[in-house]
Amino acid sequence: MDMKRSFFLVALALVFISMEATKAQGQGKGNSKKPPHDAASTHYDVLTPSSKGRERVYCQARGACKGKVLTCPSQCPQRKPKKNKKVKGCFFDCSSKCDVTCKWRRPNCNGYGSLCYDPRFVGGDGVMFYFHGAKGGNFAIVSDDNLQINAHFIGTRPEGRTRDYTWVQALAVMFDTHTLVLAAKRVSKWDDSFDALTVRWDGEAVNIPTEGDAEWRTNSEEREVVVERTDETNGVKVTVAGLVELNVKVRAIGEDENKVHNYQLPADDAFAHLETQFKFTEASPLVEGILGKTYRPDYVSPVKRGVPMPMMGGEDKYVTPSLYSPLCNACRFKGQTGSASASASI
């Protein structure tokens, strides 16, 4: 009996030690963070291009696509074409889709989640509407538990008009403890070769390279943020991992456009502004904001259909004290912005 009992106790101890070791290994794995950019779709290594100059990648993501080599089609041979505005970019998807597609690398002002013109939105429900706001005002475009996007409006009010003509001059993207600001510089005469786009990260100016991958990345441990040029000047794609993608283009009001709409713009200001298209990785069922609320699963648009300019109200609900403030009557953002963002200038 003593030998049996001793054998049983030794066996039990070995099982306990094995369980503790397994648990420790599991905890070790849990504590080691994967790189924030290690999402399945973009988890790949870039290979040398094919003999015909088509870019290739080696997929690293787990699943059916792991270990496969994907090649850009002849219609879009490069991931980041910048010098030809009429060429689409090649997008690799190393997830279970294991697919390669050609896409435009600029905002589609008629697509879902777009914000263009003076200003005209296309919501997550596909319905187009206008939102006047006010010149010099700041409004919450999106406000969710973990993401806030505000817009700063510029504008003018010609004599005899009761409302401002407005455009979005800057966007502040707030998440975690950070604020990323994209803004159009004030220019008197528009020149496509002049880069009128400015980028600030937590209050500090960011220089987006024009050579190589022509991109800037953060070293933040929370999540990766990438700003990459989609054109030599005035065009970028912004990716905030796990939250949102933005395609942004700076444009100005041309002379013909000014005359047709009777904006009566001053001669020393081309009213450079942003055209943007948003793609949200995830949004809560209670997401708010001028654009954000159109992504609610139960949302029904109140705008009048079939009219040339269907208007959306809500200035009182979505006005914010500043471009960097997450506060408004309907805002939901729970993050804490960094102190640097509060003192940053547009």
Image (cartoon, rainbow, N blue to C red):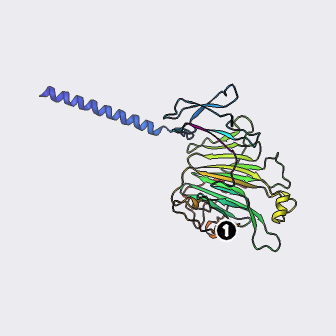
Q: Is residue 114 left or right of residue 96?
A: right
Residue 323 seen by the camera: no
- Closer-to-camera residue (77/117): 77
Residue 103 seen by the camera: yes
* Residue identified by numbered label 1: 311
- Residue range highlighted in magenta: 97-108
Which of the 4 quarters of the picture holds residue 261? bottom right
Queried whether the magenta region covers residue 313, the answer comes back as no
Which of the 4 quarters of the picture holds residue 339? bottom right
* Residue reaching furthest to the front: 306
Q: Dividing the image into 4 quarters, which one contains the N terminus?
A: top left
**Residues packed near mark 1 inside 10 Å, few (<14), some (14 to 19) or many (20 plus):** some
Queried whether the magenta region covers residue 98, the answer comes back as yes
Q: Is residue 258 left or right of residue 23?
A: right
Q: Dividing the image into 4 quarters, which one contains the C terminus?
A: bottom right
Element at badge 1? Answer: loop
Q: Residue 327 location in percent, x, y?
A: 60, 63
In the rendered image, the vertical position of residue 144 relative to residue 45, given as above or below: below
Q: Residue 65 location in percent, x, y?
A: 52, 33
Q: Residue 113 location in percent, x, y?
A: 63, 55
Q: Is residue 266 left or right of residue 225?
A: right
- Residue for point 76% across, 74% down: 162
In the rendered image, the vertical position of residue 205 relative to residue 304, given as above or below: above
* Residue reaching furthest to the left: 1
- Amino acid type of disc 1? Met
- Residue for point 76% across, 66% down: 165
Q: Residue 286 location in percent, x, y?
A: 52, 61
